[in-house]
Amino acid sequence: MTVFQLLMLGASAFFAFKIYEHIQTLQNPEDRPTKANDDKGFSDEQKGLNTFSPFSSDELIEKADEAYEEEDFEKALAFLMEADAKDSNNPDVIFKIAYILQKQGDNEEAIKYYKQALELDKENEYIHNAMATIYRANGEFTSAKIHLKNSIEIDDKNPITYYNYGNLLVDMGSNEEAIIMYERAIELNPDFEEAKEELEKIK
């Protein structure tokens, strides 16, 4: 299982537990994508803003969930974009938009939405983890490290965060520190095989 898959597994568990109780942005609300002001390249289907459906924001989120389970990411994104237009201060919706964008490989756009979500939900460790994943992939190690530290401050019992931190430290050439992170991940989850494998590589 890859780091991204582990992260997304954790995020999925978070959504299930929270049951969408809460996804303004570093931009002004009026700068968010609309039909008349969309410089972000979203299609009409993705935006879902040309004609509002009669569904409530909660119903749209539920439909987005169903579409995501069916791996129809475009439809899921369209439902989420409309839900965001109807309830622009929902950090879970914005987080899920970012999540799908990241899954589709649009990291630049995803990071914008993660930042928006974080403005609304500063204590969400999964947002920090997701942002760290993108920053690490882009070679922005300092930014990735900051978000992983923030994630640990929020929840110091999440083994995935320590595993991600260990991987980042390996990339940075700090193997001794990485060993500490992997060992902590294994201490929290003795069945964390990926952490054990990475630990063996650098010992």
Image: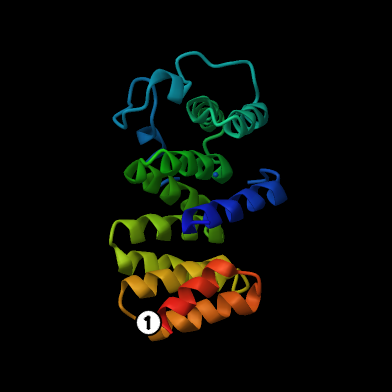
Q: Position of residue 148 (x, y in %)?
A: 46, 68
The answer to whether residue 48 is above or below residue 174 is above
Question: Which of 107/155 is in front?
Answer: 107
Q: Is residue 162 visible?
A: no
Question: Which of 197/77 is in front?
Answer: 197
Q: Residue at x 52, y 26 (%)?
A: 82
Q: Residue at x 33, y 57 (%)?
A: 137
Amino acid of disc 1: Asn
The image quarter in which residue 87 lies: top right
Q: Is residue 202 visible?
A: yes
Badge 1 element: helix
The image quarter in which residue 189 lies: bottom right
Q: Position of residue 97 (x, y in %)?
A: 49, 38
Q: Is residue 177 left or right of residue 173?
A: right
Q: Is residue 142 left or right of residue 78?
A: left
Q: Position of residue 44 (x, y in %)?
A: 41, 19
Question: Which of 88/166 is in front?
Answer: 166
Q: Residue at x 44, y 73 (%)?
A: 166
Question: Which of 193/6 is in front?
Answer: 193
The quadrant of the rendering that contains the C terminus is: bottom left
Q: Is residue 199 left or right of residue 146?
A: right
Residue carrying label 1:
175
The answer to whether residue 34 is above or below residue 135 is above
